[in-house]
Amino acid sequence: MKPYSSQTVLIQGGTLVTPEGVLEADLLMQGERIKAVGQGLPTAPDTVVIEAQGMLVLPGVIDSHTHIALDTGIYRTPDDWFIGTRAAACGGVTTVVDFATQFPGQTLRQAVEARIEEARDAAIDYALHVMVTDLPPGREGELADLVELGTPSIKLYTTYRPNYYADDATILRLMETAARLGIRPMVHCENDALVTARTQALVAEGKTSWRYHGQARPALAEVEAVRRVLFLATAARAPVHIVHCSVAESVAAVARARAEGQDATCETCPQYLLLDARRYEGPEPWRYILQPPLRAPEEPERLWDWVVKGTVDFIATDHCDYTQSQKTEADDFTRTPGGLPGMETLLPLMYTYGVAAGRLTLPQLAALLSANPARVWGLWPRKGALLPGSDADVVLYDPRPEGVVRVADLHHLAGYTPYEGMRIQGRVSVVFSRGQMVYREGEFVGRRGRGKFIPRGPQEKTARL
């Protein structure tokens, strides 16, 4: 199969999966866009036909919480935008929404422009949220620049002193301005005082090895911060998005807020659905150092319940490509960078433990991984859809093969995966990004620098299926 690009391609005989349903139909791509969906589609003599019998034809996955080439001011991942987006493409991800960090002394506009320049080697399309870290009173007007730049979402943190932390007054002030401008704040929720006190207590007891990481950041710290942030968003009359919910009670708080009429959305991640705190008691706890940490053994199933109900808007990875050597430099959770690689395994894991396990339907999978993040973040219907006129971001997934996750088969730099040895049902077979084949049968066939920055518009209400 050739790496076809910039021509007319007919995907024939597959099963198309959309949030609205599953249908036996063909899909015609012309140039960078989807031309038509149906049966018996008229084609030109030079149309390339791809036989997709037995395959699922899915909208390209949107991973809307990634950290490619992350620089926290303390740690830095050694990947770059080509490495990160190549790994994403090999897993069926055709759009990432990453972050432009406002470093000290920068305006928000400078932060976005610098990140776009840094991402010039991206192999697939990308959009940006903006981490606001230095916007004192009187400079809130800079948020208007984000609407103009096509980056109408800001990330705030209730923890991580001194580089990211924002106190309640700052969060409320920025939310009030964001509400007036149509910007959606997204918030990392952990009570900083509780985390700091617990960490200091563990350090005083000499309990700093990796196995104590989860104890340093208790679930109570997350739940308290989620409830507080929802309350502040109500006071500011602002929409709000809660990132990486690791316990069911965080999602329940969002559900209650919605029931009261609040515009609140949330996400969770594969690590919180598939792994739990028992991993810290195993032989390699360094593999699972992340914030928030893995939770009690009963939490994954509780989170799955909320996913199945449709309360969790989408699933993202919080991908961070720290290497094994960075992770294992010291058996000390206070000195270990937090974050796990995950973009390339997102779709196979969610198909295996969601659809194949009988928890999710195929339409729910398409909603959680494609349509809903597109709608929430203002990318719909250009992204996340198998509709005429949408970008031809298409994944052929073969549900028949059986295998396991092996780091040797993956394309990130970390040298490990937290999912090593886990069973996988099916595999990503072919991936198109705006009509160009970027992956086929185990091989990346895309091109450095072909990815585009995608400006985002206002969000759409999420369809909860």
Image (spheres, rainbow, N blue to C red):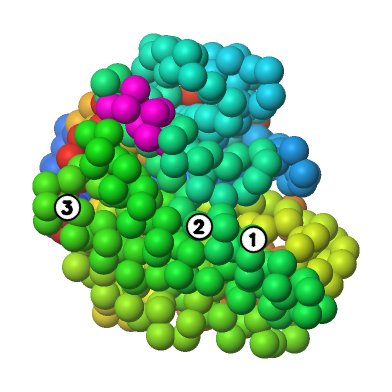
| Residue at the disc numbered 3 | 258
The disc label shown at residue 196, or none: 1
Q: Secondary structure at mark 2?
A: loop
Q: What amino acid is found at the position of numbered circle 3 in the picture?
A: Arg
- The residue sitting at 56% across, 81% down in the picture is 277
Say if the magenta span includes residue 172: yes
For the residues carrying marks 3 and 2, which lies nearer the camera in this image? 2
Picture quadrant of residue 23: bottom left
Q: CA distance from mark 1 to mark 3?
A: 31 Å
The disc label shown at residue 383, or none: none
Region of the chain picked out in magenta, as a range: 171-179
Q: For this rendering, which residue is in front, 236 or 446?
A: 236
Indicate which disc, 3 or 2, sits on the residue closer to the N terminus: 2
| Residue 76 in view, yes or no | yes
- The residue sitting at 46% across, 53% down in the picture is 189
Whether pointer 1 and pointer 2 mark residues with C-beta atoms closer than 8 Å, the reply is no
The correct choice, above or below, for 83 with respect to 142 in the image is below
For this view, does 365 lie left or right of residue 117?
Answer: left
Q: Position of residue 101 (x, y in %)?
A: 60, 30
